C-alpha cells in the first residue's frame, strides 16, 4: 500500500495509468461491459463501483485539455439514462466540463483502441466512461 493512493487503485491499474501517454484513453466500464472482446489489456476491479475508481484515479490523472477528456456511452434509442450516474462520475472526477456522449458501437470502437479497459463492479446501465489523458503542466 502507498500513502496518498486510494486502496481501490491496484498495482496493475497504477502501472497502466503511469504507462499511458498524452492522448491515450482508458475505459472504466460497468460490470456488464464485454471488455475482453474489445481490448487485450483488461484490468478488473470487481465489486468496486465506477465512481469510487474515478475518485481514486482523479488525483493521479491529468485530463486532456486539448480534446474532449470525458466520454460516455449514449443510450440506445428507446432506453433512458439514470442522471445520477453522470452526477456521481462528475463528483468523483471533480469535472464540470462537457461530457461527450457517443453511440454504443462507436464506444466499442473507442474501447478497441483504448490503452486499457478497467472493468468495474458498477451495475448501473450505461455506466461506461472513457478518460483521455492530458499533460501535467
Image: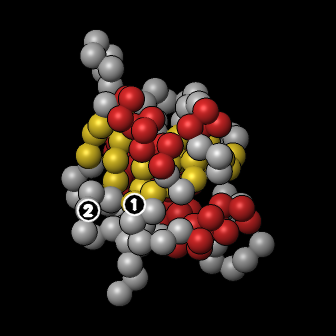
Q: In the displayed structure, does residue 105 sit left or right of residue 31? A: left
Q: In the displayed structure, does residue 118 sit left or right of residue 100? A: right
Residue 85: image x %, image y %?
A: 40, 38
Badge 1 marks a residue whose secondary structure is strand
Q: Is residue 120 visible?
A: no
Q: Nearer the viewer, residue 6 or 23?
A: 23
How many marks are shown on the rendered structure?
A: 2
Residue 103: image x %, image y %?
A: 31, 31
**Quadrant where the C terminus is found in the figure:** bottom left
Residue 38: image x %, image y %?
A: 56, 37
Separation of residues labelled 1 and 2 (CA atoms): 8 Å
- Answer with the quarter of the image where residue 81 lies: top left
Residue assigned mark 1: 132
Q: In the displayed structure, does residue 120 sit left or right of residue 2? A: left
- Looking at the image, which residue is at 39% across and 66% down? 23
Q: What mark, if any, has residue 67 been given in the picture? A: 2
**Quadrant where the N terminus is found in the figure:** bottom right
Residue 108: image x %, image y %?
A: 45, 35
Instruction: Examine the rendered structure and indicate whether residue 5 appears above or below residue 79.
Output: below
The reply to whether the C-beta atoms of the residues labelled 1 and 2 are less than 8 Å apart is yes
- Looking at the image, which residue is at 27% across and 70% down? 65
Badge 2 marks a residue whose secondary structure is loop
- Looking at the image, which residue is at 27% across and 49% down? 99
- Looking at the image, which residue is at 49% across and 30% down? 124
Amino acid at each position: 500500500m502507498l500513502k496518498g493512493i486510494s486502496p481501490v487503485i491496484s498495482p496493475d491499474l497504477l502501472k497502466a495509468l503511469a504507462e499511458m501517454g498524452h492522448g491515450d484513453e482508458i475505459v472504466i466500464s460497468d460490470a456488464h461491459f464485454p471488455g475482453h472482446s474489445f481490448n487485450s489489456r483488461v484490468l478488473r476491479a470487481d465489486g468496486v463501483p465506477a465512481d469510487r475508481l474515478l475518485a481514486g484515479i482523479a488525483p493521479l490523472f491529468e485530463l486532456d485539455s486539448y480534446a474532449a477528456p470525458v466520454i460516455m456511452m449514449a443510450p440506445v434509442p428507446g432506453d433512458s439514462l439514470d442522471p445520477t450516474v453522470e452526477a456521481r462520475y462528475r463528483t468523483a472526477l471533480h469535472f464540470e466540463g462537457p461530457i461527450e456522449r457517443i453511440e454504443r458501437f462507436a464506444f466499442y470502437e473507442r474501447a478497441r483502441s483504448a490503452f486499457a479497459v478497467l472493468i468495474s463492479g458498477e451495475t448501473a446501465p450505461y455506466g461506461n466512461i472513457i478518460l483521455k489523458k492530458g499533460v501535467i503542466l
